Image (tube, grey):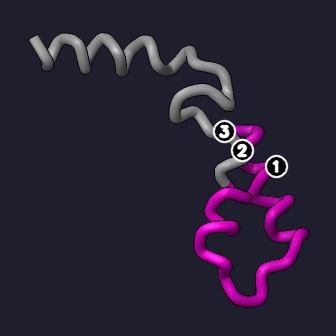
Amino acid sequence: MTFWQVTLDMIFSAEVPYGYGHAFGPDAAQLWVDILDPPDWDPATAQRIYDALLRA
């Protein structure tokens, strides 16, 4: 039963809009920066990654 529940959840979860559930969309780039605090990070790099994720 659990297998089928998870399988159906995975199929229908692709339709979830950004900001709900685990669909972070392009915001994931800034979330990881906030968590990892990489050295030499600049806003231009964050914007390039955000833009690339937005197009994906």
Q: Earlier in the sequence, mark 1 or mark 2?
A: 2
Mark 2, residue position = 26
User: Which residue is rendered at x = 80% and y = 64% of the image?
Assistant: 46
Looking at the rendered structure, the number of numbered marks drawn on it comes to 3
What residue is disc 1 on?
51
Q: Magenta segment, principal secondary structure? A: helix
Residue 14 inside the magenta-drawn segment:
no
Q: Nearer the viewer, residue 36 or 29?
A: 36
Say if 28 sits above or below 37 in the image. above
Classed neighbour count for the residue bearing mark 3: other residues with Cα under 10 Å, few (<14), some (14–19), many (≥20): some
- Disc 1 on helix, strand or loop? helix
For the N terminus, the image quarter is top left
Q: Residue 2: percent from the left, percent from the top?
A: 14, 17
Mark 1–mark 2 CB contact (< 8 Å): yes
Q: Quadrant of the C terminus?
A: top right
**Hey, what amino acid is under mark 1?**
Asp
Q: Which mark is residue 22?
A: none
Separation of residues labelled 2 and 3 (CA atoms): 4 Å
Residues 4 and 53: in front is 4
| SS category of the residue bearing label 3 | helix
Q: CA distance from mark 1 to mark 2?
A: 7 Å
